Amino acid sequence: MNWSKDILNKIEFDNISNIEEKRKLGEIIASKVQDGQVIGFGSGSTSYMATMAIADRVKNEKLNIIAIPTSYEIKMLCNYLGLRTASLMEYKPDWSFDGADEVDDNSWLIKGRGGASFKEKLNIVNSPITYILIDKSKKVSKLGEKFKIPVECVLESINYVKEELIKLGGRDITLRKAKGKDGPVITENSNIILDVKFESIEKQLEKQIKSIPGVIESGLFIGYNVEILEY
Ligand code: 5RP
């Protein structure tokens, strides 16, 4: 028997900014899909639009692909749309796609507004290439000019992590609050997120943040194998 899956139809994104640009980016990424491929799926509204476009192609052309999703949100969307999903335990992606919050001229990124940067980074390092889909609002001349850096850490470590982030130059550190639940955001890995402002982001900062005991991952992506697709 098949489930009706109507419970999943509320996975849709509300109020998508620059939706026409994101729709076009979705079409561009969907045109890269080939039968039999394993593809890493990012998270956020741009990835949502890309997933919809890929699902259309898969359905119309009866393609067989496997999606490696980076969040419950995209996993559930894939499930709703009939796209087969698996994890990095079973498959290595042929390529991945994702969105970003900020991209600079060096293709350094800030990601993680959606709280999924841990698995997003895992997909990126496991993929020969990851296409980062951005509309013009994502380009910045100085990384960190609009967004804080999300730092996912183990709950017990937050006071220590906060002090260490301040030593690295972090300011205005806030615990990310949940919407639809009291208290903090609890990530898909059962951790919390501190959002941290850095006035200056140097090459070593990602590794410095990651080396703080208690930190699981940050939303800073410096020097990864990415290709920026802007529309
Ligand atoms: C989620 C992410 C997203 O890719 C990033 O926040 C961009 O989101 P959107 O496509 O909605 O602008 O990193 O953790």
Image (cartoon, helix red, strand yellow):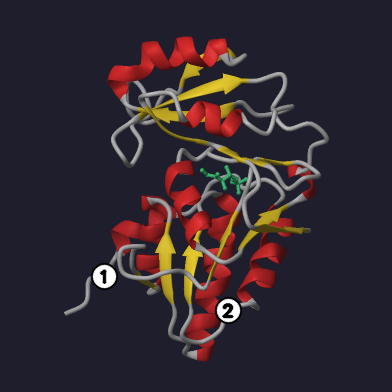
Residue 33 numbered mark, or none: 2
Residue 14 numbered mark, or none: none
Nearer the observer, disc 2 or disc 1?
2
Residue 30 on image: x %, y %: 61, 74
Category of crowding for the residue at label 2, using alpha-carbon neighbours closer than 10 angstroms: few (below 14), some (14–19), many (at least 20): some
Q: Quadrant of the C terminus?
A: bottom right
Picture layout, residue 181 above or below residue 225: above
Residue in the foreground of this view, choosing between 163 and 84: 163
Tell me the element at label 2.
loop
Residue 132 on image: x %, y %: 65, 56
Residue 4 numbered mark, or none: 1
Q: Quadrant of residue 128?
A: bottom right
Residue 20 on image: x %, y %: 72, 58
Residue at the bottom extreme of this rendering = 61
Upstream in the sequence, badge 2 or badge 1? 1
Residue at the left extreme of this rendering = 1
